[in-house]
Image: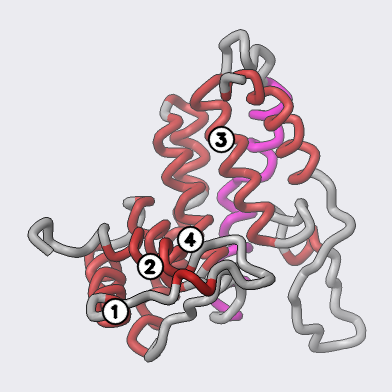
Amino acid sequence: MPLASHAAPFARLALANITREYPNFPAHLVAAPDEDTRPSTLHPAFYGAYDWHSSVHMHWLLVRLLRRYGGTPALPGTAPFTAVLDRHLTTGHIAAEAAYLLDRPSFERPYGWAWLLALAAECRAHGGEPGARWAAALAPGVAAVDRLLADWLPKATYPVRHGNHPNSAFALGLALDSGELSPATDRAVRDRLLAWFADDHDAPAHWEPSGQDFLSPALTEADAVRRVLEPER
């Protein structure tokens, strides 16, 4: 079955997810009894889809589908999708998301950070007035992630290698692919990947997968390192 045949149901799925506030797993440390912890208060852009990174990822999926199939027979009616993206991806909402990230430097590190960069890159790739508007709105979030990565990487002595969300290789590879990093942070990511992984050998791939993996530790590492090694290596 061609991928295009899934465009409309996938877009409807993404739309339903990013507009559904509950159930929600906020991973938020409550500091006072009167604190407003509603997901839409904490995260005015990315409150849906159970948790923050899933919401960001679902926004990415929706923009990707609009770029690939919007206006074609596979996805003819795009107005409901663009309306929600316009409502969520505003400068004010993303500024609030960026402030939340900067106030909590370990929140969604590094998986959610990487998906935010991927979303910005996908908006830029979408092009046209809507894509440019969404990408511009995402700029404060991109700047926050860039700063957080630059602060974190020198302190990250060891990578996380297991095959789920905190996997270091997957997130940093996705961050590099986005093309959204500043030159200095891009260089820091490449250097850290080499420091972590360049000398690895004899990966115990026969132990994979573990009971909670959705990524292959060995393959994500190889995929990240091939981005940064010289061709002759």
Residue positioned 64% across, 54% down in the render = 93
Q: Amino acid at mark 4?
A: Ala
Q: Position of residue 105 (x, y in %)?
A: 54, 80
User: Distance of mark 4 from mark 2, alpha carbons?
Assistant: 16 Å
Asked whether the residues under the numbered discs 2 and 1 touch, taking CB atoms below 8 Å apart as contact, a structural biologist would say: yes
Residue positioned 26% across, 58% down in the render = 227
Quarter occupied by the C terminus? bottom left
Asked whether the residues under the numbered discs 1 and 3 touch, taking CB atoms below 8 Å apart as contact, a structural biologist would say: no
User: Distance of mark 1 from mark 4, alpha carbons?
Assistant: 24 Å
User: Distance of mark 2 from mark 1, alpha carbons?
Assistant: 9 Å
Q: For the residues carrying marks 1 and 3, which lies nearer the camera in this image?
A: 1
**Residue at numbered disc 2:** 221
Q: How many marks?
A: 4
232 displayed left or right of 108: left
64 versus 3 height, above or below: below
**Residue at numbered disc 1:** 200
Label 3 neighbour load within 10 Å: few <14, some 14-19, many 20+:
many
Residue positioned 41% across, 62% down in the render = 219
Where residue 183 sits, quadrant-wise, is bottom left
Q: Amino acid at mark 1?
A: Asp
Label 2 neighbour load within 10 Å: few <14, some 14-19, many 20+:
many
Chief secondary structure of the magenta portion:
helix
User: Distance of mark 3 from mark 2, alpha carbons?
Assistant: 27 Å
Residue 63: mark: 3
Q: Position of residue 193 (x, y in %)?
A: 30, 73
Marked residue nearer the N-terminal end (4 or 2): 4
Marked residue nearer the N-terminal end (1 or 3): 3
